[in-house]
Image (tube, grey):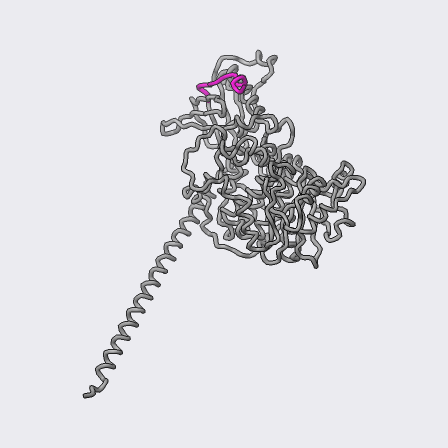
Amino acid sequence: MVTDLIKIPCVRNLVFRDHLQAYPESIINVTLHNVIVTHKQPDGNYKELWIFYTNMDAIQPKFPMKTEFRSQLPLSPSLASVYTIVLRLKTLETCYFDVPVLDDAIKLAESLDALIANTDGLTCDVTFLFPFCFSRDFDVIQDGWTAFSVESEYSRLQAISDEWRISDVNKDFAICETYPERLVVPKSISDDYLKRSAAFRAHNRFPLLCYLHKSSKSCIIRSSQPLVGPSVRRCKEDESVVNAMLTQRNKKGWILDTRHPNIIKSAQSKGGGCEPDQYYALWRRLNWNLEKHNLLQESFMKLMDACIDQSEKDRWLSKLEGSNWLLHVKETLKTACTVAQTIDCEETSVLVHGSDGWDTTLLVTSLAQILLDPDCRTITGFEALIEREWIQAGHPFRTRCTRSAFGRSSHGYESPIFTLFLDCTWQLLQQFACSFEFNDTLLIELFEHAYSSKFGTFIFNNEKEKKKYNGIKQTVSLWSYFNRPEILHTFLNPFYEPNPNVLWPSVAAPSIVLWRSLYLRFYENQTPQREAWDEYLLIKEKEMQLRSYVNKLRQELLELERKCTEKASNTTSIIKTEKDPVTI
């Protein structure tokens, strides 16, 4: 029971500090789902800050927690005796609680530590999370749970090619637990072939279409690694499934493996591996070394360690470089560009996979679609991409986002794969500022909701989990909240001009920059950037007003020209009538 983890339900007369200022005489209430911090504002009014346990990443008590050290510290409050608890949040904010009484501080720290551990992605009770208790407080204009269905995606494909069908082979998740129940597959492939192909792939994640190019009909395909093993096993059905998606028969396709060759060899010795050249003769292989989830987590933690370091600039830059985070961003974008080049320039299909097919695979395929498809650069298209390529494709959000940049889980499966995707998208937004309908506010909101949310969209590992816990009926979709006019307005990019072309970003080192408005928003003054953005908006609004006024003047001018033409025509007709001789 959660109540057993709460050692102290309320602490009074503490000092609460955030990145802006300190608030004396604050109160903390520890509830079933969150901590409520009540603090006094400068205007005298009280404000409540709700911090969900799912948003708590780690605590750092600045005093001894062990019993043998407690006797060394004074128990009564004094000016010199303040016991500070540092609370790091998954959304990258840091909160400080200066508690005047040691016993209260220890009980609060123990409570928070236990409650954080209780949110572990593998052991926590999903139905106890706040999304299952959240009572919707807004009117739903569009139900987010039904907004992006397989049927709607299939109708788009039908407009390009009629060589595909919807299969129910995975009904009740009988074949693959991490795929949705309904899947788009080639018409020429039977369900029996799909079952045998699934048995030959890790976690039964057989090759699936995720993008069809309008002009060339070439495909982006994703899967997990084949279970070749040391004996180099073969599966003719899997070969047929893969070859059926090679729409350009006169060209060889590419199999892009996101792992280093040494990792592939190690995986093959354990039963995995890659597609043997002799059996997949219509395909060429390309390896691209994208780091595994645990190494990305280490990089993310080092990045935030640099961001919260307020020391001299040289040390900050050294820490930033040592994190290798920007290098991961660069390599990911280069890989996505390779896929886009294969589809658009070589006009042939590409199969992308790593080991499991639910991490770096989705990272590459989704970014490649942003480069290729202008619809993915709209708000609705971007939401559909995330729903299709991340949520329905089985990225384990609950496991990967159980910790952020400051904490560690008991299982070690946490990783900022989705954060890396959002960062890469932000890099594209910086280089092609007019090609995206949305601004970085949408990206930051997605980052926050992926780690901690009152909505059910990102709290499951896959569609099977969502169905098991009745997530569609018991929770509210984030898209239902986002797609309301008053919320959509905050995501709009005023400089957006639809760009039908493929985006070819620069991946040179100087072009990859730190996403300061996310990673540094609580650690450096963001006022200049906000003021500059507000000035941009004013200029854009003024421009729109002037354009509207110009259009109005043009309409008035056309109307005047029309009236003048009519008047001139009538005058000419009258004069002509007067000059005509009268015949008797």
Q: Nearer the viewer, residue 110 or 208?
A: 208
Image position, residue 390 (x, y; %): 58, 41
- The answer to if 3 sits in the magenta stretch is yes
Q: How many marks?
A: 0
Estimate the x, y position of residue 193 in percent, counting from the top left.
69, 45
Which quarter of the rendered picture does the C terminus lie within?
Answer: bottom left
Q: Quadrant of the N terminus?
A: top right
What is the x, y in percent for residue 556? Answer: 31, 63
Q: Residue furthest right?
A: 231
**Front one among 537 and 34:** 34
Residue at image point 68% right, 51% down: 244
Q: Is residue 34 above or below residue 536?
A: above
Is residue 263 one of those drawn in magenta?
no
Residue 460 placement: quadrant: top right
Q: In the rendered view, would you say 79 is above or below 332?
A: above
In this view, the residue in front, 454 or 105, is: 454
User: Is residue 120 depicted above or below 539 in this figure?
Assistant: above
Left or right of 317 in this view: 286: right
- Residue farthest along the bottom direction in this orientation: 584
Rendered location of residue 311, percent (x, y): 57, 34
Asked whether residue 304 is in view, the answer is no
Residue at the outermost top position? 71
Q: Is residue 247 visible?
A: yes
Residue span colored magenta: 1-14
Which residue is located at x 52 percent, y 28 percent? 129
